[in-house]
Each structure stands twice: as C-alpha cells, then as structure tokens.
C-alpha cells in the first residue's frame, strides 16, 4: 500500500498522465528493485520511489522537476554492494598477483608470461606470504577480500586497518616466520621474516585529498603519508617491514579521474625510504562522469541555487577541499551513489543529510556528523 501511495504521489508531483505514469512506473520499479532500494542510509521504512517523490517535491513544478527527474534517469550512477564486492574480488587477480608474478619472474630470469611455472616456484610462494594487506578505511572490505582469495591469502596477513598495535605486529611476524619455515624447509633469517610487499585497500576516491595532500606550508597530510611514515619507522608496524626493497601498493576499488591524477602527481614526490610506491585502481570513473557546464547545465543551475543548498555543511572538514560542497567536496561534481553511503564529492542535492534544510535523494550519514 505504501508503495502505491508513493507512486501516486510521484505521478501527481510530476503531472503525469495515466499513460506516462504506466511507462515511468516500469522504469522506476526496475531502478528500485535492481539497486536503489538497497541504499543503507534511507531512514527506516523508506525506499527509493518514496524518497524520489519527496525529493522532487522540493523543486518548482514544471522544468525544475523534469530536470531533476531526467538527471536521475540518465546521469545517476549507483554502485551497489554486489558490484563493489565484485571489484574487491578482482583486486587480487588483476592487480596484486600480476605484480608478484612480475617480481618473481624478474628475480628468477623467467618469462613473466609463464604464469603456471612461476606460481609453482618457492620464490613466488615466499613472496606471496611476505605480502601484508591492510585496510585504509572502513570501506576497504578486507573481510570480503580475504574470503575471495582463500587459496592465496591467509588470515594472518590481512588486517582491517593500518593502525596496527605492537602486539598484533609481533603476532604477524611470528606467524610469518612459521609459514616461511615450511616453504623454505629451514628457519628463515630475521630479514626474510619481514614483509616486502604492503597492500593498502580502499573502496572509493573522488578527489584524493583525504588520502594525500600538502598543506599551505608544504607539509604532507592524509592517510598515505601517515602510513608511509609508520612503515619507515623503526618500531611499530615498521618493525614488521623489510629494511629495503619494499613495494607499497595502494589499490582503490573505484576512483575518479580527478582523484587518480591528484594522487599520482603527489606520490611522485613522496619519499619512502624502504622502497617504492605503486598506485592502481580496479574501476576508473572517466572524466566524462563529472557534471559538465554545457551538457549538464540545467542540473547545475538547480544545484547552484541558494535555496537548494545549506551553507552549514561547509564546515572545517570540507575546508580541506578548498571549495564549497555545493557541487561536491573539492567540487567533485559527481553523480555517484554508493550502496552503503553517498560520497560527499557528489553534488549536494543528491546527498543532503536529513538534518539539513534541503532534502537529499540518497541522504548521506557523515562520520563528522554534528550532535543534535
């Protein structure tokens, strides 16, 4: 009954005829059942069609509502939990394993295309076990990564966070040494009993500034410089890492072109004394995804109206992006929604939180949310 009421409300808001309602109903029900109803931040009992009706109602009847509705039908990108999990599954076979194969082939002087022969070598198995996988954020899905690669990665070399305690670090090294003794048929040396590949996993990057940036004084900030400093240190996590020849691999499941360019540019000047840093993305959002001044002019005109923006969201956390969040953090201009939460790099009209003066289509819950 609630679904029927929401559909009738939507038809009334949009001024559809019975024929238009029938045609649009099939489209919207496909959207809702295929992906959009799974959005995890809808308030209890709410689903996509109801949220869409309430969202559209805030715009003026006529062109504004048609512009907003066309944007949802033609430009919105919703990455579901299943799709994100699939990208997690792809990260090892498409990025991590090829790196380990290439390194092993170079060490042994083998043709890197002889994959089966390389995988059978003791050197590859040793390199694989000396690979440590860490999560860079809550969305890293290290649990899913581990379950997707049970034949390759053990529980002892995958951890959900990069801030590893002294006790956990020591336990990782102890179990690494035990595993290597079985591969080598001898006790490994102290240097062998440390990790030589470190993989950092993250789910989404739209601007790259939370991962790596420089402040006005030229000092490094962000997760990546912080982790590099930890790996370079003598104690803590750094004690579990080899002294030289380490490869730090940063893998992001989904990233925009803006984030990729920003991250790669800054990584070129970030020093890692123990080795090198690589950056790769499983699925890239091309530059054409960003809302364009010409192609998306009607929707941008809506987003730029003051009545469809709450200036309270431009807080100190958003100031890092050096732009208003009206068109997204760091002016990301994205039309992207993730199944678990909407990134604030998308335009504000999509993710406006419930506590703001504007209604969001897929309201975001922020980790910096103010107490009410």
Image (cartoon, helix red, strand yellow):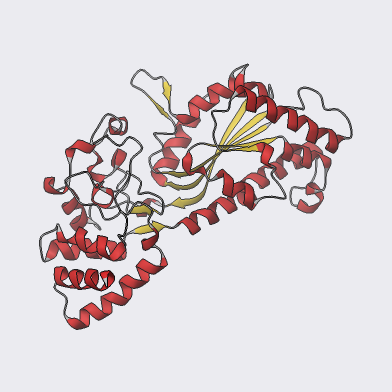
Q: Nearer the viewer, residue 47 or 130?
A: 47
Q: Is residue 72 above or below residue 148?
A: below
Q: Is residue 288 above or below residue 267?
A: below
Residue pictured at 28% horizontal, 44% vertical:
328
Residue pictured at 26% horizontal, 69% vertical:
2
Residue pictured at 21% horizontal, 64% vertical:
53
Number of disc labels:
0
Q: Position of residue 199 (x, y in %)?
A: 60, 37
Q: Position of residue 107 (x, y in %)?
A: 78, 36
Outermost residue, bottom side: 19
**Quarter residue 365 falls in:** top left
The answer to whether residue 69 shows anywhere in this view is yes
In this image, 135 relative to 359: left or right? right
Q: Position of residue 98 (x, y in %)?
A: 67, 47
In this image, 81 relative to 365: left or right? right
Q: Nearer the viewer, residue 230 or 156?
A: 156
Q: Position of residue 172 (x, y in %)?
A: 69, 30
Quadrant where the N terminus lies?
bottom left
Quadrant where the C terminus lies?
top left
Residue pictured at 23% horizontal, 38% vertical:
313
The answer to whether residue 195 shows anywhere in this view is no
**Quarter residue 208 falls in:** top left
In this image, 278 relative to 264: left or right? right
């Amino acid at each position: 009954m609630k679904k029927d009421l929401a559909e009738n409300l939507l038809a009334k808001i949009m001024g559809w005829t019975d024929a238009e309602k029938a045609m649009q109903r099939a489209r919207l029900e496909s959207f809702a059942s295929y992906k959009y109803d799974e959005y995890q931040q809808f308030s209890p009992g709410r689903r996509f069609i109801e949220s869409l009706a309430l969202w559209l109602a805030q715009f003026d009847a006529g062109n504004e509502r048609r512009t907003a509705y066309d944007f949802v039908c033609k430009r919105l990108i919703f990455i579901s939990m299943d799709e994100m999990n699939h990208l997690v599954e792809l990260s090892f076979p498409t990025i991590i394993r090829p790196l380990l194969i290439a390194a092993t082939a170079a060490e042994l002087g083998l043709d890197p295309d002889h994959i089966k022969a390389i995988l059978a070598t003791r050197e590859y198995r040793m390199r694989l076990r000396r690979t440590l996988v860490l999560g860079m954020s809550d969305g890293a899905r290290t649990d899913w990564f581990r379950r997707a690669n049970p034949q390759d990665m053990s529980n002892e070399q995958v951890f959900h966070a990069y801030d590893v305690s002294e006790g956990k670090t020591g336990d990782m090294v102890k179990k690494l040494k035990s595993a290597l003794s079985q591969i080598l048929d001898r006790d490994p040396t102290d240097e062998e009993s440390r990790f030589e590949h470190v993989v950092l996993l993250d789910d989404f990057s739209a601007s790259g500034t939370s991962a790596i940036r420089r402040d006005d004084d030229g000092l490094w900030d962000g997760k990546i410089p912080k982790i590099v400093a930890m790996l370079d240190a003598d104690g803590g996590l750094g004690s579990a890492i080899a002294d030289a020849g380490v490869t730090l691999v940063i893998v992001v499941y989904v990233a925009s072109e803006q984030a990729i360019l920003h991250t790669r540019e800054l990584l070129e000047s970030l020093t890692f004394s123990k080795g090198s840093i690589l950056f790769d993305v499983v699925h890239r959002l091309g530059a054409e995804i960003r809302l364009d001044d010409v192609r998306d002019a009607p929707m941008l005109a809506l987003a730029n109206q003051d009545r469809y923006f709450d200036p309270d969201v431009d807080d100190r956390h958003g100031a890092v992006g050096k732009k208003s969040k009206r068109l997204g953090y760091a002016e990301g201009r994205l039309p992207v929604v993730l199944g678990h939460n909407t990134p604030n790099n998308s335009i504000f009209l999509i993710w406006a939180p419930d506590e703001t003066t504007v209604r969001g289509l897929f309201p975001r819950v922020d980790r910096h949310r103010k107490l009410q």
